Amino acid sequence: MRRARGSKGVVARRGRWGWALVLPTLVILGLFSVYPMGNAFYLSFFQKHLLSNAPPKFVGFGNYLYLFRSPAFWNSLRATGIFAGGAFAMLVGLSLLLAVFISSRKRFQRFLQLAFFSPAVVSTVVAAAIWLLIFDPRGIANQLVNALAGTPGVDRKWLVEPGMLQLATMLVYVWKYVGYFTIIFIAGIGTIPRSLYEAARVDGASAWQAFSRITLPLLKPTTLLVSVVAMIQCLRTFSTQYLFTQAGSPRGPIDVITLNVYYTAVRTFQIGRASALSIILFAIMLFLSWLQFRVARSEEVSYL
Amino acid sequence: MIRRRLVRGRSLVATIGVWLVLGVMLVYILGPLLFMVTASLMPAVEVTRIPYRWIPRTFYWQNFWQAIRGNDGRFYFVRNMINSVVVATAITFSTVILSTMAGYGLAKFEFRGRRTVMLLIVATMMIPFQVIMIPLYLIAMRMGMQDSYAGLIVPFLVNAFGVFLMRQHLLTFPNEILDAARIDGASELQILRRIVFPSSWPAIATLAILTFRSQWDNLIWPLLIAQSRHMQTIPQYITLFTEEKYTDEGAMMAAAVLASLPIVILFFGLSRYFVGGARLFSAHKG
């Protein structure tokens, strides 16, 4: 009995230590993550000018209604959809392909991993700066395409023509992040028992069958993780588009939501509108993550 | 016999196919990096020469001087580089320390509300920075943190991902060692400093690198909070330098090379932990 009470005292004391260890983090996250999140939601119902000291004016759903009626918003949504959709498909497809190919090699595995990962090291701004020059009218992109297509001297207008500009931003983004997801996939493939492949080979399965019947199904947790992370990452893109527009590209085709939020807040000072825009972005991210988890789960059920 | 030869023939074709794809991808991935390095050593006319010469004829070091000096001769590069190093280092240290503390508290201490705290932290992981940046900017302004190190550092002192990472790591830490230390009369702080920190080195290294890298890359927050050129960071310097009329292509790439140097050195020194960072992602979910 006495022992029990004694240990309870120890537990209480240790509980206080637990709180003490967690508290600084809680305060910081509360102040700089949770509160701003609530505040963004709150501000999205108000009209507020960045530079004026006037208190925010309640406008209800005014900001949202304004956005839904403005062509710029729909353009942003389209730009984000095109960029995120394209970059996402390329990222997931290519990184899976690369991971399978690299895992199938006996030699150079480490070199290949590091090589494909290396662009993730340079910062996004540097990446955008490099590719700006590559996409220059006199740059390597035109030279390469013209050499392959046998059309010397044609300018593909990478940084001007809307479709090409969108493709250009995707290429930069995929270039930077494909190695990162490749490594996650390789780690996932590494957890699949090799004996399964040996058994399949004995049974006369082709490489494609081994991939589609063993690798792909067993890799599903990794694929889900990669697609959720990649999707959110693509929706958050900012630096590439920012640097391209600063360098003189037209904003319209690559005016992704984050860029629009920035310009709305910093150039037109409409804080409420910018907040509403970012809340919409958040809702899109939540919805897509939820959808991916759901799709993954429903597929799991159908397999059983 | 024929069958075996057929299989071998097919696997040869497959090998060639695989290397073809890997080769094309290697060109796509490494080509631009090679371009950055070679172009940084060329005068502008050489950079835009058709066809591009992948091996520079002469080393045009003036590019680097122009990148550092800036077009206005005010050497903002140096100042902005120092800012970047200071900010990223400070954030890395505080993130590692606070995440380890919180992760340790969540993994090894029973207390009321622990589950709620954990849930809250995981939920915070879902909040994208782009969504909260405007209110955060208003808060920072109200606190008078614009154009200061505080403004650049304080919002990132710790992040939910770090706490989550350290907690997952410390869950596997043997309780016996902690209890033994307590019996020996070590205080909780001593245990944290002498046992938990040193034995968590691989997880800490990974977290440190991820944090440093993401801060080195941070453009959007400094754009908002640091308007004066004295307080700007390297990503902003590159952006501004790229826009300027007198910047030529060679100098642009020289600035890019210089801005990448610190992180490239880190990468080659600690590539194990870099790659480990990506792996950890799948490890604790899988």
Image (cartoon, rainbow, N blue to C red):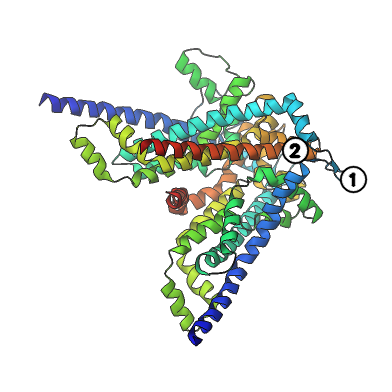
Q: Residue A79: where, in percent of width, then height?
A: 63, 27
- Residue A133 seen in the current view: no
The residue furthest right is A54
Residue drawn 43% across the image and 44% down it: A184
| Mark 2 secondary-structure assignment | helix
**Residue visible at 79% across and 51% down?**
B141
Q: Quadrant of residue A13?
A: bottom right
Q: Residue furthest left?
A: B1
In the image: residue B170, left or right of residue A129:
left
Please give the name of the residue rendered at 39% of the width and 35% of the height, measured from the top-left corner.
Answer: A302
Image quadrant assignment for residue B134: top right
| Circle 1: residue type | Ala
| Residue underneath mark 1 | A54
Residue neighbourhood size for the residue with mark 2, other residues' Cα within 10 Å, grouped as few (<14), some (14–19), many (≥20): many
Categorize mark 1 by other alpha carbons within 10 Å: few (<14), some (14-19), many (20+). Answer: few
Residue positioned 90% across, 45% down in the render: A54
- Chain hosting mark 2: A
Location of residue A249 in the rendering, given as x and y in whole percent from the top left corner: 67, 26
User: What residue is disc 2 on?
Assistant: A274
Towards the viewer: A271 or B137: A271
Please tell me if label 2 and label 1 are on a single chain.
yes
